[in-house]
Image (cartoon, helix red, strand yellow):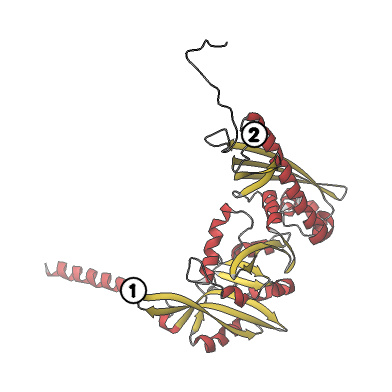
Amino acid sequence: MNLLNQILSYFKLLWLLSILLILNGCWNNIEVNNTVMAVGTGFDKEEEDFHIFVEVIKSVTGTDGPSVQSMVIEEKGPSMTEVARKLIRSGKRRIVFTHNRVWLFSEKVARDNIIAPMDILKRDQMFRLNSFIFITEDDPKVILSTPTLIENLVSTELASSMEFVKYTAEFLPMDLESFKEAMASPIHSAVVPIINTHLKLTKIDGTAVFRGERMVGKLTPEETKGLLWLRGEKQGGVLTTKIKGEAASIEVKKVKARCIPSLEKSKLKVIYQIDLEGFLGDMPPSVIIDDSFIMEFEDQVEREMNRNMTKTLQKLQKDLKTDVTEVGLHFYRKHPEEWSKVKNRWHEKIFAEANMELDINVKITHKGLNNRSLGGKHTKPQYNPYLPRKD
């Protein structure tokens, strides 16, 4: 019996020791009281130094209890690592970037070399690869200091807005991981949303186009729609056109795109097959929504999409000479041997001089609960049971 008790005591001791190992905590843990949490970071360039702005969390205790607010601190230096150390003087604590949601780069930095300040972001374990990237034509400090509508923190509100892209589909969210992959791809190009201030509030205002480490130009929100259709990434939003001189819209539900590239005598030919499905949106009050109208409206939407995507392709080919449609990736995967011969002149020669063909098919899958628009003058057939029927 004593032997059994001793064995049970040994097991209890081992169990307690194992619990102590689990409760030991992380070897590199940081005390919250000794740090300041960064939620958004902006980069600007002044001569040879980076001017870095950081939105940090500031706890405030009021009559209604504790609340979360933010403030923007700033420093200058030749590298982010050095500036992070200098920021301790402003924040009076060590700045921790593990909760940083937004990286904001001025257009000056983007056109000079965006890879230089981003190098540490993709290698250091502190930074979140799912945090979002933006380009701004304004001062990054102005963006990080704008009033918010819903959230208490500007950066948190910007990051959460990326979840609702499906309702507008006028921009393509870009995070650190996706940007890193795009820059490492064979075509070395990417797109990043542009954010500016409008009436003292932030607003997505187009798309920055990158070839290699530099920004080469921008697309308007309308041109960005065309780009997303070409890439098959526009799975929502609204397209408005005119039917019988009045505005009519389609609510986009699904877009499927297929790219077929071929090289004939050093001349690139690309066929884009775009299939779009959607619901009827706003309709003119005078129309009757029957089969003939649906066919007419589908044809009109196809023409509007053709116009939009042709305009986008012309700007990418003639003005920016940059392939962000990912046709280069399709060509690389299907023709790797030929790719090695043209990769060094892909953007400025092969893509810029390519022949593009658009094959667009629009399908209205739902027209609503009523086949007549509100406000239309429709004659209701009269029926009198006491009069003889006219066959």
Q: Which residue in the protein does label 1 denote?
A: 23
> Is disc 2 placed on a helix, strand or loop?
helix
Instruction: Compare marks 2 and 1 and give the one earlier in the sequence.
Output: 1
Kindly give the residue lying farthest to the left in the view shown: 1
Which sits in the foreground, 12 or 29? 29
Image disc number at residue 233: none
Q: CA distance from mark 2 to mark 1?
A: 66 Å
Which mark is nearer the camera, 2 or 1? 2
Q: Which residue in the protein does label 2 denote?
A: 294
Kindly give the residue lying farthest to the right in the view shown: 265
For the residues bearing labels 2 and 1, Cβ distance under 8 angstroms: no
Q: Position of residue 22 (x, y in %)?
A: 34, 71
Q: Position of residue 100 (x, y in %)?
A: 53, 72
- Residue 340 visible in the shown view: no
Q: Position of residue 348 (x, y in %)?
A: 83, 60
Residue neighbourhood size for the residue with mark 2, other residues' Cα within 10 Å, grouped as few (<14), some (14–19), many (≥20): some
Which sits in the foreground, 218 or 297? 297
- Residue 367 visible in the shown view: yes
Q: Position of residue 86 (x, y in %)?
A: 57, 87
> Is disc 1 placed on a helix, strand or loop?
loop
> Is 129 rendered above or below residue 93?
above
> Is 44 rendered above or below residue 290?
below
Q: Quadrant of the N terminus?
A: bottom left
The amino acid type found where label 1 is placed reads Leu
> Is 285 rendered above or below residue 18?
above
